[in-house]
Amino acid sequence: MNPSELIYPRQRQAPFREWSPSIHYAQFQRLKTGSMPLRRLYDFELLYVSQGEAATTMRGQRYTITAGQLIFLPSGVFHQNEAVSKPDTRFLGIHFDFFDELQIQTEADLVVNEASVDIGRFAHEAVSDVFPPLSLNPVYTPPLVCVQLMEQLVQEFTNRPLGYELVCKALMLNILAQLLRLPLSRSTFLASQHDLKLFELMEQIEANPAKAWTNKSIADRLNLSLDHAAKLFKQLAGMPPIEFVQSIRHREARRLLRESDLSIELIGESVGYADIHYFSRLFRRNEGISATEYRKLSRIL
């Protein structure tokens, strides 16, 4: 590692009211197996793995990022990303800065040209007295609500409706807050004898959303009463068990609509809804448009 790289990311102590993130790029990506070029960024990137496995080598350490995890890539730090899964790995990438300090015209403005480095252009990481910097531990497992916020941000940035900049800024602040809370919340979660079981159960639901999850089956797995299981689950997940299951199924349905040619009926079955009419009603209620319209829109964009 070059000793000069130790100064990056540059950091700025600032109260939360001064944080004003701007979004430079937000997109779903599919990359074939293999390594990408070594690079540095002028801004910051959240690189979330939605399917498959990836790896990033940074500061002499190789980080493995599995589906459901993200890596925080700091400004000014050399890193090399790799799509590990075959035939490809699927990502959600968001480029941003914390203080609206960069003017980005094209995607090429995000990556440092090492033949003509602009030292004054590297963005600052916002830090506070409340949380440790995000760059301290770069790999995170974001909660479902954070993933939904990232997906919504991609949609806003892609569609660019009137006022999208304001919405993207608000979403990014919420995403940052969710990530900053993770180390603290994780230690708090595991304080209870039931929390580890709950956390493992949530991971099982995410891995197999089509399974016949019910309030009773969830309570039985935890060896708790229905009411007590629902209360503890909501404390950890932020929503009741069945609502959590439905949100995971909806997320998987959206992914399949974007990335596969399966019929709407088969997609409904694959996420746990044998009744196509029920699946269609739920999808429209959650998304505001039909599954067919969502697929068409995602492919136009």
Image (cartoon, rainbow, N blue to C red):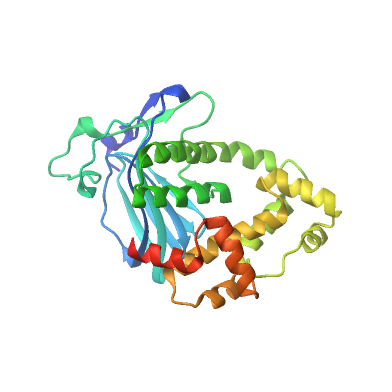
Locate the C terminus and report the quarter of the image it occupies.
bottom left
**Left-right relation of 208 to 264:** right
| Whole-percent x, y for residue 233 in the image | 73, 49
Quarter of the view holding residue 44: top left
Q: Is residue 223 left or right of residue 182?
A: right
Q: Tell me: residue 251, above or below residue 189.
A: below
Instruction: List the single residue furthest toward the right.
Output: 225
Q: Residue at (68%, 38%) from the top-left corner?
A: 188
Task: Find the residue positioned furthest to the left.
Answer: 115
Q: Considering only vertical position in the picture, is 161 above or below 9? A: below
Left or right of residue 20: residue 180: right
In this orientation, does residue 59 appear? no
40 vs 3, nearest the viewer: 40
Residue drawn at 44 percent across, 76 percent down: 261
Residue 20 seen in this snapshot? yes
Comparing 296 with 112, the one in front is 296
Q: Residue at x 86, y 54 (%)?
A: 225
Taking the image as shown, residue 46 lies to the left or right of residue 132, namely left
Q: Nearer the viewer, residue 264 or 142?
A: 264
Measuring from the top left, give residue 86's x and y in whole percent: 41, 72
Residue at 65% across, 55% down: 244
Quadrant for residue 267, please give it.
Answer: bottom right
Q: Quadrant of the N terminus?
A: top left
Q: How many marks?
A: 0
Give percent across and percent down for residue 161.
36, 46
What percent of the width, then of the height, locates residue 119?
Answer: 20, 32
Against 134, residue 11 (above or below) is above
